[in-house]
Image: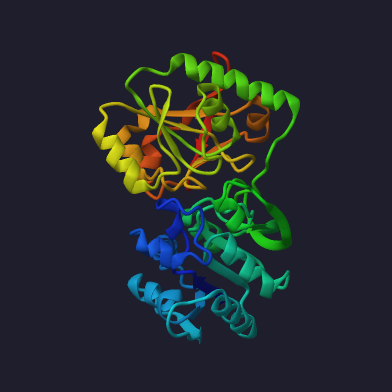
Amino acid sequence: MRRIGFLINPVAGMGGSVGLKGTDGNADEARRRGALPGAQDRAATTLRHLSASPDLCFVICSGEMGESVLHKCGITSYRVAYSFQGNSTAEDTKRAVSAFLQEGVELILFCGGDGTARDVFDVTQRTVPILGIPAGVKMYSAVFALDPVTAAALVSGPFGIRDAEVMDVDEEAYRKGVLSTHLFGIARIPARAHMTQVAKQVFEEADEERAKEEIARFIEEVMLPGVLYIVGAGTTTDAIAQRLGVKKTLLGVDVIRDGSLIASDVDEKTLLDLVGRYPETRIILSPIGAQGFILGRGNQQISAAVVRKAGFHNLIVVATPHKLRETPLLYVDSGDPALDRELGKSIQVISGYRIAQRRKIVRSP
């Protein structure tokens, strides 16, 4: 029997849909804004795909950190190695991982975001491989599977081992629109081609800025009067806002209509309300550098429900030629597998003034 350590950060990702850009230390505020936990559903998707694997034995945490989801998925081959009371904390994660290592696990599978990855690696270092089921807001680290189904395929199938960056993101700075990251460590992860994401990259060079200006010039030219434009995070979309004379939230989601800012740094609820009030909506997104995600990373406010309401055919993806060279494949992980499939096998990406490239979209196996 293969022994797999498994834990969930129950509050991971709660800050995304309500525009908090992260949940570390901010779970109470996320709840106040009406956020609902989603990590357990993400974890359940993975576990359902693993429930038929007879050679797996899980070493887990009690309650919402693991046991309740295994019960829900009908998995009975497990041992509770760590129990906690009240709301779980980062310290609970670290203690649980220590208990897993004492039980001799071969792999630690966790469900959370960058903060959870950092806490797990803080204990494991390079002693055993780790793998994340993506459930956080940002997930800049490279230790995550592409989505919950891919995580199950990695755990259940044959895999190699590779090194992957664990990135430390300053959430306080991030909430203020400043991206501040540094390398926290190099973990070992299970790996198969196109099944794990890479660390987020930021591209800065003179040609990049010129390309952003050309993209912005073209988008301004094709914007239609009376149409609502939801504009995602990033420096390329920021260039579009600057072209329009609008001050954008660099790491948030904003809404523009007729060249004016309608709403700034919005949450999912606000977007659903606005899309319902205006007859036509477009969504402008830029893939995360090197990772290639256009939905499901860093822009959870633009949820599957928002995309469906606006119409998935109204997605506009923009990226500079340099970013596309470094991002040969695009990914979607909206949380709605049916929507992800409806987006098709490829999508057009605007990469300059009246220039576009078609890029393949990769999904779960």
Pick the quarter of the image with the N terminus.
bottom right
Residue 345 x %, y %: 46, 32
Q: Is residue 37 visible?
A: no
38 vs 186, left or right, is left
Q: Is residue 314 visible?
A: yes
* Residue 249 position (above or below residue 37): above
Residue 269 x %, y %: 32, 48
68 vs 168, left or right, is left
Q: Quadrant of residue 123?
A: bottom right
Residue 222 x %, y %: 44, 15
78 vs 257, left or right, is right
172 vs 185, left or right, is left
Foreground residue, 227 or 293? 227
* Residue 343 position (above or below residue 84): above
The residue at the point 56 percent across, 74 percent down is 90
* Residue 303 position (above or below residue 96): above
Residue 328 x %, y %: 62, 33
Scheme of image coloration: rainbow
Q: How many marks?
A: 0
Foreground residue, 343 or 242? 242
The residue at the point 66 percent across, 69 percent down is 121
The residue at the point 60 percent across, 49 percent down is 197
* Residue 179 position (above or below residue 225): below
The residue at the point 53 percent across, 50 percent down is 146
